[in-house]
Image: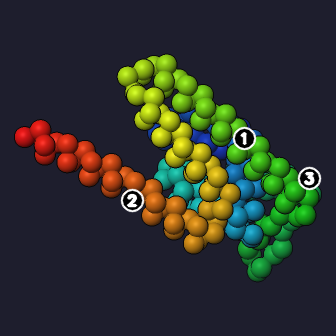
Amino acid sequence: MSGDGGEGSGLEDEGRRRPIAGMGLLRIVILRMLMEKGELTGYDIIKEIERKTGYWRPSPGTVYPLLRDLESRGIVARREEGRRKVYYLTPGGRELASKLEEARVSLRRDYERFVEAASVLLEPEIPEDVMEALREVKAAIAEAEVHLSNPGVREKVVEALRRAARDIRHALDSLRAAEF
């Protein structure tokens, strides 16, 4: 699937050619990827987005004009390696990407609070102690989020989450076994 850029989206719902996000989101995604990876070609950006999402593959006709726009604004710069154009953030681009990351974390927390409130209101049968435990897990993940680029931290967080999932399944299996 690819976005044709004609809709001005860069994101389309597979098979329907319906935009699912605006070009503003793609700009933010590109800035974040350059912040994380350092340097990327337009092709690298397209492939990485497709790899991460499993379905979204913005077209070159969407990505390259955005990169040129970001370059004209002094947010990214490029250098040529043969036929390849390698893009990277300028100092101003790194500052902008940092501000966007702070805003993203804040918006994500607001969104998670909204989803939590909606789930409590729509599914009141979830006991409060379970909801409190879920809030604690979400808070711990939010605290760890800024450190997840560190492989050691990420490995420990993933291990702890998998251990928690195993413990929950084990507790449920024990209850089921006791019922028989």
Badge 2: residue crowd in 10 Å (few <14, some 14–19, many ≥20): few
User: In the current view of this chain or complex, which residue is farthest to the bottom?
Assistant: 82
Left or right: residue 149 compared with residue 56: right
Left or right: residue 85 compared with residue 15: right
Name the residue that disc number 3 marks.
73
Any part of residue 2 in sight:
no
Disc 2/disc 1 C-alpha distance (Å): 28 Å
Q: Earlier in the sequence, mark 2 or mark 3?
A: 3
Residue type, mark 1 in image = Ser
Q: Which residue is at the front of the view, 36 or 49?
A: 36
Query: Which-is-in-front pick, marks 2 and 3?
Result: 2
Which image quadrant is residue 110 in? top right
Q: Earlier in the sequence, mark 3 or mark 1?
A: 3
The residue lying at 38 percent from left, 22 percent from top is 125
Name the residue that disc number 1 marks.
106
Residue type, mark 3 in image = Arg
